[in-house]
Image (spheres, grey):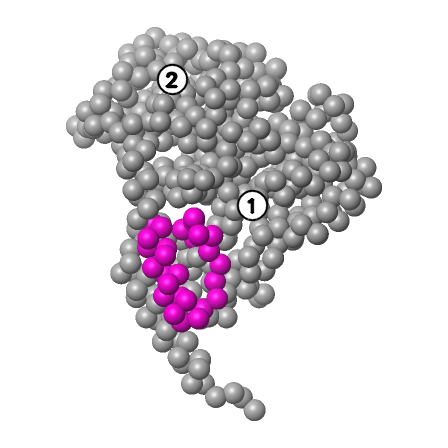
Amino acid sequence: MILWKKLSQQERQARIERALQENVNFAHDASLGYPASKLDSKVFNSDMPFLKDAPTLQTYVANPNHIGCHTFGTSEKAFSGTQEMEREVLKVLAEDIFKAQPHSYDGYIAPGGTEANLQAIWMYRNFFMNYCEALPEEIAILASEDTHYSIPKASNLLMIERYAVPVDFETRKLDKIALDKIVLAAKHKGKKYFIVIANMGTTMFGAIDEPNDYCELLERHNLLYKLHIDAAYGGFVYPFSNSESTINFENPKISSITIDAHKMLQAPYGTGVFLCRKGLIENVLTQEAEYVEGMDLTLCGSRSGANAIAVWMILFTYGPFGWCEKIRVLQMRTDWLCNQLDVLQVKYFRDPFMNIVTVQSEYITAELEEKYDLVPQKHGEGNKWYKIVIMDHVEVDHLSTFITDLKRTIHVKERTPLKV
């Protein structure tokens, strides 16, 4: 690891306090030009004594605006202290976790994985239009049917046609024969440029796409593409549970990655991450933002610097070894659940390196769904799966109680006579 290490509570607090001192202090500085301020003191009392031992909450009260992209060009100097901490977060994620070379990437802390995925597709659409003189109708999005709903949302917003690739019902792997037919049909329809979304942990199944399934086929058909990895869920799991993973920036075909910090990392909601290789993010420069120091290269514009500090706090509280240990514990709990389901001969899907277990719906009653807050693949009629996510709060005791109830319902079904 290059930067990532475990820091003591005193070290973390000192680092954040130093960053806040480098930022503008709206409580004391005569900052006349910013349409911003600290949080309203009538509601958020900055003199509360507990804040002195809560540096992350101090940052929320200070209310830094991290508008722009702090890995590219200059940024608003009023918030330089916490911007530097955001760069430290991006360095850990890009270099230490996803194996990028130093200074080879851009990125920012986004307001969630949905925006990070939108940012990627917007960026690649403009890239093809700027460098290949592509027409919008010549560009297509290619992703599996299990891909997150942010991808059809991007298709709608950016008016780019989307092709959903079928997957095998039980293995959730891409149907490569169907993929070939889809690409050929798109090519015949005039599509020349493809924005590919490969999943590192699908929302419902935790399934891992093989990026080369897309790359080899598109290259065989002499089609240009850009490859984005949606690791919104798996980004803080898979690289730690699978030491042999090649889904990172060492693969030259991967150009960008989305990660969500408000899932596995347990940061406050509204905290995603967007990372991409150098030479790409400038395709979404908003030149009209002339009053912004530096360049606004993000979809959201203004964004909370406190979210970046929350991610920094989590990363440097655990350190790499502490985080690996946490993921190992969750993997063990997931293994335990799967072993119990195997004994009961219950059909389910689980990638061996992930902590999501998705059970076929025939085994789940309405009572089990309600008692354990199980999430269906589809609300209403036609649902075929329910997922169980082994998060930090889900202990073996909870899983054991679930298995006991599941076993009881299965036995009841077995004893129920068939209706004539």
Secondary structure found at label 1 = loop
Magenta stretch: give its range: 330-356
Residue 211 is situated, as x and y percent measured from the top left of the image, at 59, 40
In terms of sequence position, does the residue under pointer 1 or pointer 2 come before the other?
2
The quadrant where residue 97 appears: top left
Whether residue 60 is visible: no
Identify the residue at the far left of this view: 49
Is 378 in front, or is 202?
A: 202
Quarter of the figure with the N terminus: top left
Secondary structure found at label 2 = helix
Residue positioned 45% across, 85% down in the render: 416
Q: Amino acid at mark 1?
A: Asp
Q: Which residue is mark 2?
A: 84
Residue positioned 31% across, 17% down in the render: 19
Quarter of the figure with the C terminus: bottom right
Query: Residue 138 lies in magenta, yes or no?
Result: no
Is 329 in front, or is 358?
A: 329
Q: In this picture, is 81 found above or below 1? A: above
Whether residue 104 is visible: yes
Q: In this picture, is 210 found above or below 222? A: below
| Number of residue marks | 2
- Tell me the number on the disc at residue 217: none
The quadrant where residue 227 appears: top right
Residue 372 is situated, as x and y percent measured from the top left of the image, at 37, 62
Which numbered mark, 1 or 2, is in the foreground of this view?
1
Query: Residue 332 lies in magenta, yes or no?
Result: yes
Mark 1 and mark 2: Cα distance apart in space: 34 Å
Q: Which residue is mark 1?
A: 209
Identify the residue at the far front of this view: 244
Residue positioned 38% across, 70% down in the render: 343
